[in-house]
Structures are given as structure tokens and as C-alpha cells.
Amino acid sequence: MLLVQFKQADGARRVGVLEDEGRQIRVVEGFATTYDLAQAAISRRSSLSSLVETALGTTVLEYATVARAGRLLAPLDHSDAAHCYVTGTGLTHLGSADGRDAMHKKVNDVDNLTDSMRMFRMGLEGGKPAAGEIGVQPEWFYKGDGSIVCAGEQPLTMPHFALDGGEEPEIAALYVIGPDGAPYRLGFAIGNEFSDHVTERQNYLYLAHSKLRVCAVGPALLVGDLPPHVEGMSRIRDKDGQVRWEKPFVSGEQNMSHTVANLEYHHFKYPLFQRPGDVHIHFFGTATLSCSDGIQVAPGETFEIDVAAFGPPLRNRLAVQQLPVPVIHQL
């Protein structure tokens, strides 16, 4: 089941299910948002898919019409953006066969490991613990609150002081914290985690700065478990819509050095992230980047992340945002 959030022509929010291979949206009646659906499912002790199936209506819309009009929304959000955490984990993916071979050669050179490679090796050795055991904790980063999340077809803006604006095709898990403080996972969505790789490469301690950027999630929420093998294509299209760069990428536990459960444990073990009512969007990492192939994306070009199992592609155009200089006042 693939859920999408969108606005009607009159601006009213709706949530629906993708049908006809993603070409149509069947509207869910009685619920304006995915968040409302999640809260109802928690209170009724129902699965999200079961609740949605009982609420499907007769109204059907064309997905392309909604997308062209710019009325898509991220598949999960919170009415107060400050109550949505956007976070992620890195150094979690094994990459392609060639990439894996090169990576294993690096991690086995124990006398010359960088801190990043040490972290990756730790994941290989302890990121998939046996059931009931706790594995090694991954790299973790904070991106922002709900105000930085963009929907499909919206521009991704990098600040004028950024040195780069590059895509990171990833899978994100979406959660709502229940009244009891327990995380409830709704499902997964494709995302463009988006980062400043030039800044990060100056010094790995700049990672935190490089991650404080917008991101894109959607268009659809895949309800249920993440497939063990996820395969998609990441593309950069020029201003004329022509493909300038493309490369396949993989995700899912078969292609990761950590289990989803281990990544979730090390995020939600903190009481701060168990606050009832909050939303969490957590990115799982990637091993495929255009910047690794020497590509620098220019404003006006478009990122496209396409994974068939997640419905329509996620597309966002790169733009530059001029930000005012902060003025500090003494009280």
C-alpha cells in the first residue's frame, strides 16, 4: 500500500492511496492527514493498512494532475514543524559489488584506517546482532525539524553560503510517537537527504554543518516492512530535462551493514526521542553519490530518484536561497 498526502484545488488537505500503478489517487475519507490516520490506528490498536482499507472512498484523482499543480505534500508531517525530527545514519551501506570489494580492501588495511572507515568496519562487524542483542551504534546526524522537509516537485534550496548542493538517494523511515512514548513505524519512503559534500570533505568534523540543509521525502509512503533488497536509479537532469548523470543504487538490509532494528534502537533509546505526539523522519544512508563521479549540480537542474516499489519518482529542482545575515542583539 502506497499513501500520499496532497492538497485539493481549494487548499484542503487530503490523504489517499495510489492505484493503477501510481497513476491515480483514491481518497481516504474521514482523515485529512497521514498523522491523523496514524493516531487513529494507535488508539484503535489497528494496523495502518487495515484502517485505510476501511476508509477508502469513491473519489479518484489523477496523480499527474496533482503533481503538476504542485499540490503534493510530504507523506508524513506534523502541524507544528518543531515536533518533527529529521535525522539520519551514515556509513551503513555496502554499495555495488565493485564498491564492496574496494571497501573491504580499505577496511582490512587496519593500520591506515580513517575514523570514518573505522566506523564502517564497526558496522560490518557488529551492526547485525542476533535477535534480542544490541549491536554497535552507527554514525548519527541531525538535519533539522519539519520545516526543512520538501515534497516531490518542490525546489530544494541550498543556502548562498553552501559550497555544494548534492543528492543522497536514500530510504527514510517514518514514525509517530504514541501516547505511551513508544515509536510506531508507519512505513518507508524514498528520500533525497541532500547535503553539502564539498564542505564535508574539507574536514569530517564539518559533517554537522554539511547536513543542516533541506531534504525531500516522498511522494509516497510504503506501508509495512522495508523489502530486504531495494533497487532504484538516481539521476541528474539538466535544465532541458535531459539526463546528465544516472547511476543505480541499492538499499534494504541485504545491502546494509546494519539491521533496521539496530538503527532504530540506537535512535529511539534516547528519552528525547520518545516524546508522545512527535514525528520522526530518519534516513538510513546511501552508497551512491553523483559527487563521487565528479558531478556538480547547477541551480535549475533536477534531482530524480526512481524506485518502482515506492511509486512515482521523487523529483526536485535545485535552487539557491539568499539568506539574510543574522543580527545578534544584546539584552
Image (spheres, rainbow, N blue to C red):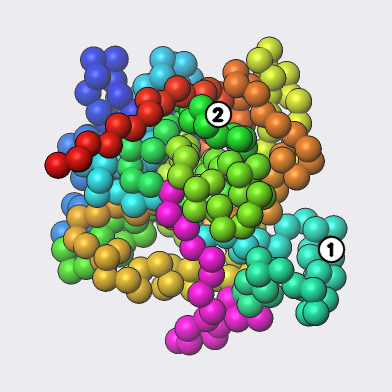
Q: Residue at x 27, y 65 (%)?
A: 272
Q: Is residue 153 magenta?
A: no
Q: Is residue 269 above or below residue 34?
A: below
Is residue 107 in view from this perspective? yes
The residue that disc 2 covers is 315
Spatial CA distance of label 2 from label 1 is: 31 Å
Residue at (66% x, 69% y) in the render: 115
**Residue 231: % across, % down:** 67, 49
- Residue 243 falls in which quadrant of the image? top right
Residue 229 place in picture, x, y as percent: 64, 58
Which residue matches tag 1? 102
Q: Which residues are magenta?
A: 125-143
Q: How many labels, in total?
A: 2
**Does residue 222 lie above or below 298 as drawn?**
below
**185 in relation to 10, above or below:** below
Q: Earlier in the sequence, mark 2 or mark 1?
A: 1
Q: Is 141 colored magenta in this rendering?
A: yes
Residue 6 in the image: x percent, y percent?
34, 28
Toward the top, the furthest residue is 240
The amino acid beneath tag 1 is Ala
Counting from the top left corner in percent of width and height, residue 152 is at 47, 30
In the image, is 116 to the left or to the right of 330?
A: right
Q: Residue 95, located in which quarter of the rendered image?
A: bottom right
> Which of the two residues, 34 or 25, is positioned nearer the viewer here?
34
Q: Residue at the front extreme?
A: 330
| Amino acid type at mark 2 | Arg
Q: Secondary structure at mark 1?
A: helix
Q: Residue at 53% of width from left, 23% of height from top?
A: 319
Of residue 29 and residue 296, the one placed in the foreground of this image is 296
Q: Residues within 10 Å of mark 1 (few under 14, many from 20)?
A: few
Q: Main secondary structure of the magenta part?
A: loop
